Image: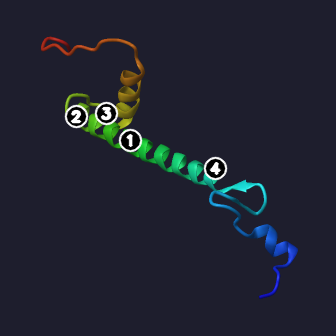
Amino acid sequence: MRAASPERAACEWKGLRGTYRGEQDYGQTHREAERKHLTNVLKMVAYHAESDLVKIVSRHYRRAGQEGRTLIQTALATAAELEVTKDAK
């Protein structure tokens, strides 16, 4: 078995957690990828919840097609207690 060239030796894994290509830490890049995936999943869940709320509001709000998402986003961002009453128009 012959020794690896210096260029190839710099690209090999070293140790259990080791490094790849010198300074790049596999654990760090793996965590970054997981964080990005989790962020994307949470954005998707929020979008689907928002879509469901827009569908519910669209039965009662004529302009839901144009302003439905804005209405829901504003309502969710507002620090207030919203109460729907029967006599509210």
Which amino acid type is marked by label 2? Answer: Ile
- Judged from this view, the residue extending furthest toward the front is 1
Residue 47: mark in rendering = 1
Is 34 placed left or right of 17 in the picture? left
Mark 4 is on which residue type? Gln
- Residue 49 picture location, percent across and down: 31, 38
Marks 1 and 3: which is nearer the front? Answer: 1
Dot 1 or dot 3, earlier in sequence: 1
Residue at 25% across, 38% down: 55
Taking the spot 47% from the left edge, 46% from the top edge, the residue there is 38
Residue 63, by quadrant, is top left
Q: Is residue 20 above or below residue 89?
A: below
The first of marks 2 and 4 along the sequence is 4
Against 23, residue 84 (above or below) is above
Give, as a three-letter code, the residue at label 1: Tyr
Q: Position of residue 52 (x, y in %)?
A: 27, 39
Q: Is residue 26 left or right of residue 4?
A: left
Cβ atoms at labels 1 and 2 below 8 Å apart: no
* Badge 4 vs badge 3, beta-carbon distance below 8 Å: no
Which residue was labeled with disc 4?
28
- Which label was assigned to residue 64? 3
Indicate the secondary structure of the residue bearing disc 2: helix
User: Would you identify the image quadrant in which residue 3 lies?
Assistant: bottom right
Question: Of circles 3 and 2, which is in front?
Answer: 2
Q: Is residue 48 left or right of residue 77?
A: left
Between discs 3 and 2, the one toward the N terminus = 2
Residue at left offset 76%, top offset 63%: 21
Pointer 2 with pointer 4, Cβ within 8 A = no
Where's residue 17, x and y in %? 63, 57
